[in-house]
Every structure is written in structure tokens, then in C-alpha cells.
Image: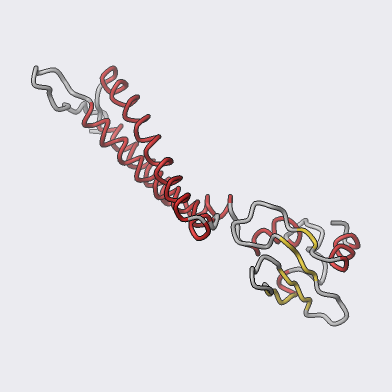
Amino acid sequence: MLFRRLEPPRTAAGAPDYRPPAMVFAAVMAVALMVTSFYMVLASQLFHDHRRTAYALVCAATMVPFLALYAVGHRILARFGLYMWQSLTVGLLALCMMSAAPSWAEAVFPRAHARYERELGGPGRCLYNSPYRLDRTQTTYPGPERNQMLIDPIEDGHPKLRLDNAVDGGLRHLKPADATSRQILTAYGC
């Protein structure tokens, strides 16, 4: 059944018309790309900061591949034919893309805690075996812009670590915000 050839619609002249199936395949993939791009603009905080730009990027990430897939798709279908397995493959690919979109967005634009783990405090990082590991601290985001991360160790006698660029979805590395934080990072070999 998977390798069954499907009969495409016919034109007025009676020739097979592969444009409608190609349009459906391109539309299914465009919806998957739209969902993925929405997750990306949400995770990157672009939707919150620059809404019109985010909408424009989502439209571009949806329409450009849609038009390209349609332009190439109907030619490929006209050459090789329309089969059931092609429909199932496009549907499964779209479902896989949409289900993986949140994890892709989190990997590309991680939250501030995940960025701290990735850059400084995670396993194998310079602050992992220190009092500044996240499970041994209290973390706050002071200030009106909330772009600083204040890491206060639970153990007494350790100064607070203050890091800049600590925004969700940020692309710049975390960096020390003051001289004390610079000394802490230097002392642990960061």
C-alpha cells in the first residue's frame, strides 16, 4: 500500500496536474516551519522586544520555503509520479519538526540558568565544584532591566557573583559585572 501510485488530478486537456499535490506538500511543510519559527522568535525574546520584526521573520521563514518547495515539488512529482509513501514521509517530517521545535529553540536560545550551566556552572565547567553551582546558591535578577544574574552562595563567607548579559534567549556570553565577580571567576580558572 505504501508504494501504491496515486492518480493526480487532471488538467482541462486531460494531462496529469501535479501542482495541487505539490501545493499540499508545500503547505504542510510551511505549517511545520511556521511553528518552528514561532518557537524561535519566542525563545529569542524577539517577539517580546520587536514584534513586527518577529512577524516578518516568521512570514519569511514560512513563505520562502513554501514557494521553493512548491516550485521544485511539482516538477519532481511530474517526473517520478505521486506515491502514497511521499505523502506519509512529508506528514511524518512535518510532525517531527513541530515536535522538536521547542527543544531546538531552547538549544539555540537558552534561558539564563541554562546558559550559566552551559558556560560556567555545569558538569566539567569551572564553577561546577564550587559554592557557585546553581544547586548550592540562590539566584536573583536585580535591576530594572533584569539583565544581570546575582548568584549568592548558601555557604557563608563567599561573596556574591554578579554576571551581565543574563537574559533569556541571549546570544552574548555571560561576563562579570564587577571587579569582585572578575576575581571569583579568575580564582576558579574561568
Q: Position of residue 119 (x, y in %)?
A: 73, 56
In this view, the residue in front, 35 or 98, is 35
Side of 185 relative to 8 (left or right): right
Classify residue 120 by image quadrant.
bottom right
The single residue placed furthest to the bottom in the displayed view is 156
User: Number of labelled discs?
Assistant: 0
Residue name at image x 46 percent, y 45 percent: 57
Q: Quadrant of the C terminus?
A: bottom right
Q: Position of residue 10 (x, y in %)?
A: 12, 24
Residue name at image x 14 percent, y 27 percent: 9
Side of 89 relative to 57 (left or right): left
Q: Position of residue 140 (x, y in %)?
A: 68, 75
Q: Is residue 73 above or below residue 174?
A: above
In this view, the residue in front, 77 or 147, is 147
Side of 26 relative to 106 (left or right): left
Q: Is the image coloured rainbow, by chain, by secondary structure, or in one colour?
A: secondary structure
Residue name at image x 80 percent, y 62 percent: 176
Q: Is residue 139 above or below residue 171?
A: below
Q: Is residue 149 above or below residue 107?
A: below
Residue name at image x 45 percent, y 48 percent: 37
Q: Is residue 58 above or below residue 187?
A: above
Q: Quadrant of the N terminus?
A: top left
Q: Position of residue 61 (x, y in %)?
A: 43, 41
